[in-house]
Image (cartoon, grey):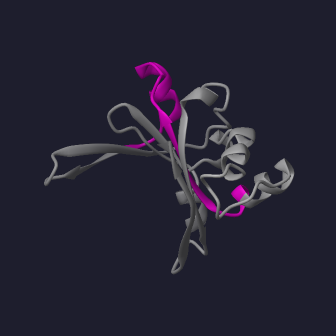
Amino acid sequence: MPSIASGFKRRTWHPDGYFVSTNHQNIPLQILNDVLASPPIYWAKGLPLDMLEETLQQSLCFGLFRNDLNVKETQRLSNAENFQQSDDEENLSLHANTTDEPSSRSVLTEKSFIGFARCITDFTTFSYLKHVWVD
């Protein structure tokens, strides 16, 4: 039986014009580290890249990207089971997927990385939201 954590760590959403992923391998480490070390993010600090990568592996991370990909690439990144969730108030729909594909850093360009959030969590009853950034 797959763990609860594994179900959360490979999710993607592609609302209009954006791509959101919980796969930490999609996060461009150097750019994230530069953001964390920048003056506007005064509450955080940059880390050695190997330490940052380990931190992301042990957390639930959300990467936000401008969806500069074509439809075929977006489907490839989130090619597993589809389900739709509607928000009746704003009439929006999100498409959420799970995928076991390896890192897609080569497809998601660094220039399209525009946001990040990290949750420190046990994946069942507790989550602490940390390091939220949107450009």
Give the side of residue 80 with respect to residue 107, left or right: left
Magenta highlight range = 56-82
The structure residue drawn at horizontal position 63% and vertical position 30%, both measured from the top left corner, is 110
Q: Residue at x 66, y 46 (%)?
A: 35
The question of residue 132 being in magenta is answered with no
Tell me residue 16's x, y (percent). Answer: 32, 34
Above or below, comparing residue 29 to residue 76 in the picture? below
The image quadrant that residue 121 belongs to is: bottom right
Number of marks drawn: 0
Residue at the farthest bottom position: 125
Q: Nearer the viewer, residue 86 or 17?
A: 17
Membership of 65 in magenta stretch: yes
Residue at x-position 74% and y-position 59%: 45
Residue 92: x and y in percent read 22, 44
Identify the residue at horizontal 71%, vertical 63% (top origin).
Answer: 58
Q: In the rendered view, does 128 fall on the left or right side of 47?
A: left
Image spot of residue 15 (x, y percent):
34, 39
